[in-house]
Amino acid sequence: MEVIEANGFYFPPGFSPEMPPVTTGEYQRGDKIVHLKFPVLTKKKVALLAGYLKEKRDKYLSGMPVEKIVHTLDKASRLWLDRKYPYRKLALKIIPVMTGLSPGAVDESIDVEMKSSLKEDILRALKSETGNPFYLDDFQYSESLNGYCRAFGPRLIVSFFSGNIPALPHLVFMRSLLIKSACLGKLASGEPSFIPLYLKTIEDIDPEMACSLAALYWKGGNKDLESAAFNQADAAILFGGVETLTSVMKRIPRRVTVLTHGHKLGFGVLGRNRLNYDALDALAASVAYDISMFDQHACLAPHVYYVEDGGEVSPKEFAGALANAMKKMETKMPRGALSPGEAALINQLRGRYEFRELNGEDVTMFASSKNTGWTVVCEKDPGIFHASPLNRFIRVFAVHDIFEIIPALRPLGPFLQNAALSIGDNREKEFISRLGEAGVARITSPGNMALPSMMWHHDGIAPISSLLRWCDVEKKENDYGIKSID
């Protein structure tokens, strides 16, 4: 039995003398036991920490050149992409115990998140959302304004995380640093171990930058602690379900800028012209990857794949190829452990489809034989979107024409997130426009659903520029140290 000691929190350098007492949570899975330490928090302690972060932000982070910040973040990502990096190796031991995800899935998750967090993509994201990253450093000339502009981030961002995707919360800390904002994160109960390790990486590279970062865990619904954090905040970024977000937002002052990321749904669409035998295996492998990443627990994951009739390969044949690809994926990247309730739901749904199939309905189910590892169901599109029970359970709906699915998607507009398309003819442009109108926030290709770039407008929101406050100078007299406007 291997016992692993780790922290479920991160305090910035210099705050350690204020360290409160800690409790230890014990988690076990297989031959590993994780002892995770959590601080005993009070309203006063959270308020003190928030004040400390703002003070250090004003002293260090606010004056750091954006190029230096980007360099630090790039270096941190490259360290985490190194499979010999001690913090990564530790995370690969802890996170599977905490989440039930397989080590292979966690390994892939870290790679996905860090590969999209390198210098080139960071700079592209900054340029995309600000026009000029140096607006974050000082006033810069704007030709369109015929004046000077500067962008300011909040002094303190408070973020509440969800634990469905390992490594994902690092993006909030990255974006906070890029706009020179201190960040206090509330860790998710399901996965509170990655962020403390990631922030320790930032500290190892640049301790002054790390002085503006902290991560804590407390049980959700603690009004005193939540109010203590939000009363100090200038902005909040919240992840979670509708009920959680509704409850938390009641404790956020109106002056605070709030970005919310609730539960979302994804799907895929394959047009008849993409369904041919030569490309079948590759296409099925791409779709299987989308389904298997994060075991469908990510908002980016597909719940349904719509497959058009009339191609060389029928929807049922595609479902069979997808089943073979899912079988291979299970070997390469095994699905995580399920709770008894999750397993029971999958078995219940399998039973319903088996009964329908035996009853002569036009339904075909392919499934892993020895467990609930994966399930592929093919049937005619019922005209209603069916959310998956997750954990690699996918429905393939056969449609006569891809445009027939639009009416079923429209009522889900606020919840639509990610769509993978492979149409292969001149209908694609109009179809993409229809999906955008219906509420879809991101459209990509099969195999790329779990791989958004830093440029992605998360949930249709510009995650960096939405937090900025701008100051424009249209003054012509040169009495403030800026080059005069002609």
Image (cartoon, grey):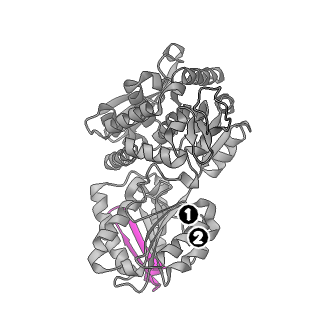
Q: Is residue 362 magenta?
A: yes
Q: Nearer the viewer, residue 280 or 343?
A: 280
Note whether residue 334 is visible.
yes
Q: Is residue 333 left or right of residue 411?
A: left
- Identify the residue position indicated by label 1 in the image: 440
At horizontal 43% and vertical 84% (from top left) the residue drawn is 309
Residue at the extreme front of the image, as rendered: 486
At horizontal 52% and vertical 74% (from top left) the residue drawn is 431
Is the residue 352 above or below the residue 102 in the image? below
Q: Is residue 117 magenta?
A: no
Range covered by the magenta-colored residues:
356-382
Question: Residue 409 — which label?
Answer: 2
Q: Nearer the viewer, mark 1 or mark 2?
A: 1
Q: Position of residue 448 (x, y in %)?
A: 39, 60
Note whether residue 323 is visible.
no
Q: Residues within 10 Å of mark 2 (few under 14, many from 20)?
A: some
Distance from Cα at disc 1 to Cα at disc 2: 9 Å
Q: Nearer the viewer, residue 211 or 396?
A: 211
The kind of residue on which mark 1 rests is Val
